Amino acid sequence: MRDLSRLRFAFNPAGSTLAVVNVEGTFRLFHTGSGRLQIEFTTGPDGAEISQPCTCFAWTSVAQQKSKSSSGSAKQLIVVGNGAGEVAAFDTALGEEIWRVSHCHQGSVTGVAGTGAGSHHIYSVGTDAMACTIDALTGKVQQQFEAGKHALTCVKATSDGQSLLLGSSGLAVWDAVTQQRLYKYPGHVTPADALAYSPDGQYALSSSQGERHVAVWKATGKASKKTKPAAALLSMEQPPVQLDVAAASKISCFNVLAVSTAGRVCVWQCEVLDSVKSTLRATIQIEQDATSPPRQQESILAACFDSAAAEEAVLVAWGLSAKPTLQRIMLPPLSAAPSSIDIKCHTAEGVLLPAKHRSRSANPSKDAPMMVVGADNTGHVVVLKAQSRKRQTEGGNGSDEAALDTQQAEGRLAVAEGREQQGQDAELTLEQRVNALQLHQRPGGILSWAMLANAPLCSIVIAVYVCKSSVLSK
């Protein structure tokens, strides 16, 4: 598995954009629907290279004031913290710096968090054990307070910005206005590094790379100095590194998603009664090719709940960090046995071949096989479904050609995604592109123009000529 320790990934709250950032502070934003790169920018002052590593970032949005040039819609921001104690905000549409604060923390900034569009606050924490509140519009520091004696590692705010969940060697919920600690939790064996709130703010969630579970804590009731135990523990096979929470279709329930260090996604449903009852709903993983070296094996980079989908779904980013594959996966209904959803991909000489996606559920007969072959030259995801076609022979007998068509598609519809291999981009040969066009010219053939996305002009002309000659000869 490739080393991703120098990269960070996060979807925006709407799930429409994926942000990828390295420690040098270079951001790449990808549109979820098309997979296209929207913008790339650096987080140094005035676009210059940064002298301190990028340590954390978070999405947030602020409401714009109506003007002749603006309709007053919310503006998407990315807030970044670095090792020099600076916090900066960037406009994601333009990639421009809006403001920068250089006196928030003495030492490294370890966590930043935003709130909903109704609250214009940014919160940051650092190794100096200080929590800082910043105006998201102007960058002005509004207040600072000491939240303990140990270095803080992460922060999460409720949607209204009234409460803050601060992570360290322990966990605590603080009132953001009065700067008073409300609840205290024992935390984890190692400092927490991922936090979340339930949609109603009644429960807080945390995880640490030192433990193989997600902890659920009750964040309501009378303030107390006593340490509260965990309301539930959601077990995993590997430590989690990313968390997301969304409302469930069932009343008094919420869904929890976690991405593990091994690139596997677990989805639970938590039902709140007298206590919290958790049920593992599904797991999502890449089914690896046994012939691929471990360092080239694929993994899931990021995942979140898709709030825009009509039904409950998960957005998954996997594959290459330079050009990730973005995929929407519908969650199966809750059943006695959790569903296992596999994303299968094959690799050969640096070329991403057609990937088979299948779901293994309690009732395999209902699973619909399909083939995901990546994005075409317009950036849209191409999905092929195996169809059975019968051709009448001279004897009048029909023969099933579905398996043959699938094999031809796998052999001819290789998508050159620019796989990282010795620093060179993978490129399909002219023969492969000609074969793809010939397949397209056949009755009932499969559309394969994505094959020619990176072909030289002369190659396209030759390919069209060969296909035309082939058709005329018939």
Image (cartoon, helix red, strand yellow):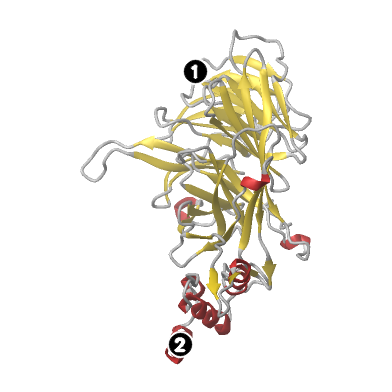
Most extreme residue toward the left, as rendered? 68
In this rendered view, identify the residue nearer to me: 381 or 144: 381
Identity of the residue drawn at 62% across and 46% down:
366
Could you tell me if residue 56 is visible in this image? no
The relative height of residue 30 versus residue 391 in the rendered view (above or below) is above
In this rendered view, identify the residue nearer to me: 284 or 182: 284
Left or right, 92 with reference to 188: left
Which of the two marks, 2 or 1, is nearer to us in this view? 2
Amino acid of disc 2: Cys
Query: Which callout, 2 or 1, points at the residue further toward the start of the chain?
Result: 1
Is disc 1 surrounded by few (<14), some (14 to 19) or many (20+) residues within 10 Å?
few
Pinpoint residue 413: horizontal percent, then vertical percent.
Answer: 56, 71
Pointer 1: what residue?
177
In this rendered view, identify the residue nearer to me: 420 or 165: 420
Q: Secondary structure at mark 1?
A: loop
Q: How many marks?
A: 2
Most extreme residue toward the front, as rendered? 395
The relative height of residue 108 versus residue 206 in the rendered view (above or below) is below
Could you tell me if residue 214 is visible in this image? yes
Pinpoint residue 148: horizontal percent, then vertical percent.
Answer: 67, 22
Pointer 2: what residue?
458
Identity of the residue drawn at 58% across and 78% down:
395
Amino acid of disc 1: Val
The relative height of residue 48 versus residue 184 in the rendered view (above or below) is below
Which image quarter is the N terminus in?
bottom right
Instruction: Quote the CA–CA distance across marks 2 and 1.
Output: 66 Å
